[in-house]
Image: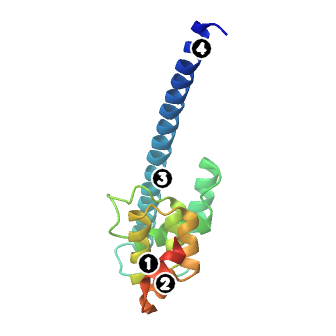
Amino acid sequence: MTTENKNIAPTYANLLEDVRQIIDTARRQAYAAINQAMVGAYWQLGKRIVQEEQNGKTRADYGTQLLKQLSKSLTEEYGKGFSVNQLYYFRQFYITFPEIFPTPCGILTWSHYKRLLSVQNEEARKWYLKEASEQMWSYATLNRNIATLYYERLLMSQQKEPVEQEMK
């Protein structure tokens, strides 16, 4: 290998690493922007569904076929992702987190919010939301912590350190 080739290889390796970092950063930013936009859209869809269902009343009328009709129309136009169950989750998302937008916790995905909807205790749900946002929990971490009743165990524990260490 000539002296010239020895100098080119490390320079190319540095270039390649820099280019990879630029691409990876851009992809993460694009994913985060898309995620935030979709979570916002789901919240807005939930809000609009609730407004239509309740039609100015405090509670929705029972027996309406709104979600079924809407699901059929949206699925025909946009494809998967708009089942009756999914529309129900959008509705519950808005009802459960009416104060969350227009400033959502940008790092949380729809999967995070959907999992949080299963937490019945409002204080626990708020705590999990706050911790997941601040600690940048992945969905898997949030799911594990909810499943193992991390919040409840912390409340009941005389010594919080062992419970916190177990979570980490």
What residue did someone put label 3 on? 38
What residue did someone put label 4 on? 6
Q: CA distance from mark 1 to mark 3?
A: 21 Å
Crowdedness of circle 4 by 10 Å Cα count: few (<14), some, many (20+)? few
Q: CA distance from mark 1 to mark 4?
A: 58 Å
Question: Label 4 amino acid?
Answer: Lys
At a point 57% along the width and 71% down the height, the residue shown is 143
Q: Are marks 2 and 1 in contact (CB under 8 Å)?
A: yes
Crowdedness of circle 3 by 10 Å Cα count: few (<14), some, many (20+)? some
Question: Label 2 amino acid?
Answer: Gln
Crowdedness of circle 2 by 10 Å Cα count: few (<14), some, many (20+)? few
Closer to viewer: mark 4 or mark 3: 4
What residue did someone put label 1 on? 125
Of the image marks 1 and 4, the number of the one nearer the N terminus:
4
Mark linked to residue 120: 2
Residue 101 placement (x, y as % from top left): 34, 61
Say what secondary structure mark 4 lies in: helix
Q: CA distance from mark 2 to mark 1?
A: 7 Å
Of the image marks 1 and 3, the number of the one nearer the N terminus:
3
Say what secondary structure mark 2 lies in: loop
Residue 55 placement (x, y as % from top left): 38, 72
Residue 119 placement (x, y as % from top left): 50, 80
Closer to viewer: mark 2 or mark 4: 4
Is 9 left, or right, of 150 in this rendering? right
Of the image marks 2 and 4, the number of the one nearer the N terminus:
4
Say what secondary structure mark 3 lies in: helix
Residue 87 placement (x, y as % from top left): 55, 65
Q: CA distance from mark 2 to mark 4?
A: 63 Å
